[in-house]
Image (cartoon, rainbow, N blue to C red):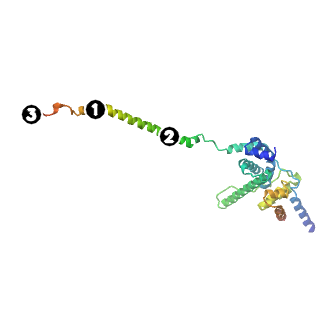
Amino acid sequence: MNEFELIQGLRNGNEAAFKYLVDTYQDRVFNTAIGVVQNAEDAEDVAQEVFIQVFRSINQFKGESKLSTWLYRIATTRALDLLRSKKSKKRFGFIQRLFGDSNEPLLELPDFHHPGVALEKKENAAKLFRAINQLPDQQKLAFTLHKLEGLSYQEVSDVLETTVPAVESLMHRAKQNLRKMLEKDMR
Amino acid sequence: MRIMENNRNNNIEDILNSLDNSQPAAAPDFFYTRLVARMERALPVKNNTGWRLKPVYVIGALLMVLAVNAVVLLKGQSETGNFTADNEESVQQSIAAEYSLNDNNSVYDLNQDK
């Protein structure tokens, strides 16, 4: 099934087309999401939301970009939305604790271990993920899409709807920031 | 001192490159099954009483009520008309009988007293 047939099938509500879409892209969407949210359960949640959104809004897809680019765009947006909502909940929990409204302890997230990282690199990767978590959103997306998902700068620029030089700049700043954070951690 | 700094820099580079050649994470097993189950749960529950609010049924029901009212009114009018034509005289008689209006005996004969 080529992309045109797949999109037509999805527009006609064809279940086989939807299954083909999920089977083809589920790993890419999940891997993108897990790189951003750094939690397997949240990543599955995000991935499900991505496919539900595609199912509902396939008629809004104009075909100006590749279907995979559109999926990556939805996945990154959803993943960032989830991160923001978790951060605001955490902030609210902190304020509640300050005023004594909540007795629940504030849970610090444990180190994230990406399932695809080799065992000997797991410890370093956990440190890197901790630092990635502190990057600004665009730098975080550019870094994870390029490093984890293996997208080229051109593909990353398509997903982020920007130019290749802008992605190069984002990557450069991301690496600089990560280096600074890691240096700080080592002192 | 310089050796320590070099070691630290190497360590940072190792950390920065720790994601190189990593395998992509695969979606969990039965992802599609769980996705479909979630989509089915999210479907709006079909309201069986919804058809009652469709304009066709609402207007139909109103027309039916109006038709029943019209039939009752027309029937009532025609029955009232027959009743008046056929029985007006008998009603008058019965009323007169009830109040003894036709009883000649009750009229005083003024000449009789004389």
Which of the pair A112/A175 is nearer the observer? A175
Which mark is first along the chain, 3 or 2? 2
Q: Which residue is mark 2?
A: B63
Left or right side of B91 for A37? right
Disc 1 is placed on an element classified as helix
Residue ID at (53%, 42%):
B59
**Tag 3: amino acid:** Asn
Above or below — where is B98 with respect to A58?
above
Residue A78, how many percent across, how many down?
A: 74, 54
Furthest residue toward left: B114
Residue ID at (69%, 43%):
B40
Which of the pair A181/A61 is nearer the observer? A61
Residue A182, how many percent across, how many down?
A: 84, 63
Disc 2 is placed on an element classified as helix
**Host chain of mark 2:** B
The numbered dot on residue B111 is 3
Task: Please tell me how crowded label 1 is: few (under 14), some (14-19), or many (20+) other residues with Cα within 10 Å.
Answer: few
Which mark is first along the chain, 1 or 3? 1
